[in-house]
Image (cartoon, rainbow, N blue to C red):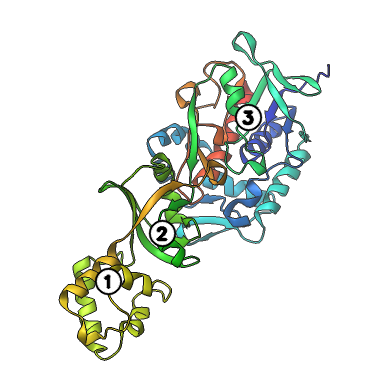
Amino acid sequence: MESQTADIIIIGGGAAGLLAGLRAAETGSRVLVLEKMDRPAKKLAITGKGRGNLTTSLDANKAVAAFGPNGKFLRGAFSRFYNKQLIELLDSIGVPVAEEQGHRIFPERHTAREVADILLRKLQSLGAEVRSGTRVLGLDAEGGAVRGAYTAGGLLTAPRVILCTGGMSYPGTGSTGDGYAFASRAGHSIVEPAPALVPIELDGDTHRELEALSLRLVKVSLFDNGRLIQEELNDLLFTPFGVTGPAALCLGKEAARRQGRQGVELEINFKPGLTADQVHRRLQRDFAECGKKSLKEIMPRLVPRRAAPVILRLAGLPESLTGNQITRAQRMALAEQLTGLRLRVRGARPIEEAIVTSGGVALNEVNPKTMESRLVSGLFICGELLDLDARTGGFNLQAAFTTGWVAGDAAARA
């Protein structure tokens, strides 16, 4: 049986694991990072479509709100390590950042993969050992205290273990839910994992007619048998299975909860700043100005060309109809489609395709000041493994960085 002594063992070399290791190693702690994949931080390397939406410029209170009711767990952690501290850390290792639309912070000249590699090199320069291709089989956590981790090579011992194996989304990056089993066997409750920030599947054929159409800043609302569940003002992209893009992703968690349920609909408002009555009045003016032109010619002035025939069909209007032929009732029908096109929702894509996993280790069993387990002394839990998930915009990655840093700091001081 192999025995490796370290002050701190970190299980998982993703965003949370790297920050936990950096913080612990810079205090002088002997750190051992165990990563089952052939290289650490594979999920970090694909964030922001490979560009790396690392954090947000919004203040901590808005970030807390982005996580919903569970966000209060992060309030104290964000007060210690948030966007300012992250940006300073990145700048110190040669990764300047820049703010882009939507308060999103991206590396100025590096890819997400390069950022992951730079963080890894910094961690190793501080003396931490990183073992890739090392699968952890379980924790040694008898008697209410952790003593190490079991691998195929034997028991690796340490008085403190930081568990940050990620959720269940994008399993090809190593997030296969291992940490849930480790935490559960140690006595922790697991809120059932489910997809969050996930594309939405639609019924019918309308979305296929609109495939590849990208809409900028439309209002997208999710309804359950007529009751408004959630609405988003953001970009939307039609796909062969339904819709994706920021607006759809933010609604995906609620769509997943209603998988297969009848009466769930997605509503798209192409004119989010206007009411149906205001759109009707605009149509009245436009059609008066273009009296002899057909709807086929007029509609591209109002919506993307690819959407025009679909909207006309749903409104029951032929493309050949001219502006001076349209009745008030027909204008109203068209205005209703422009401000409230309805599509039937089937559910969401599988959890493997979600950007983030909702659910995880119950927050009331983790100390929010240290990320240490309230059940097992010396065991720290952080990152996506926790029951935390937020909307798009860099919040989830910042939470991984923050909880990792807090866990590394607390483990080093324990």
* Residue 13 in view (yes/no): yes
Residue 80 image offset from top left, x and y in percent: 51, 36
Residue 321 image offset from top left, x and y in percent: 27, 83
Secondary structure beneath dot 3 equals: helix
Residue 354 image offset from top left, x and y in percent: 53, 45
Residue that numbered label 3 is attached to:
178
* Residue 409 in view (yes/no): no
Q: Amino acid at mark 1?
A: Gly
Q: Mark 3 or 2 closer to N-term?
A: 3
Left or right, 130 with respect to 76, comes to right
Residue furthest toward the right?
A: 1
Residue that numbered label 1 is attached to:
316
Q: Marks 3 and 2, how far apart in space?
A: 34 Å
Q: Amino acid at mark 2?
A: Asn
Please name the residue shown 63% across and 41% down the image.
Answer: 171
Q: Marks 3 and 1, how far apart in space?
A: 52 Å
Q: Mark 1 or 2 closer to N-term?
A: 2
Q: Quadrant of the N terminus?
A: top right
Q: Amino acid at mark 3?
A: Asp
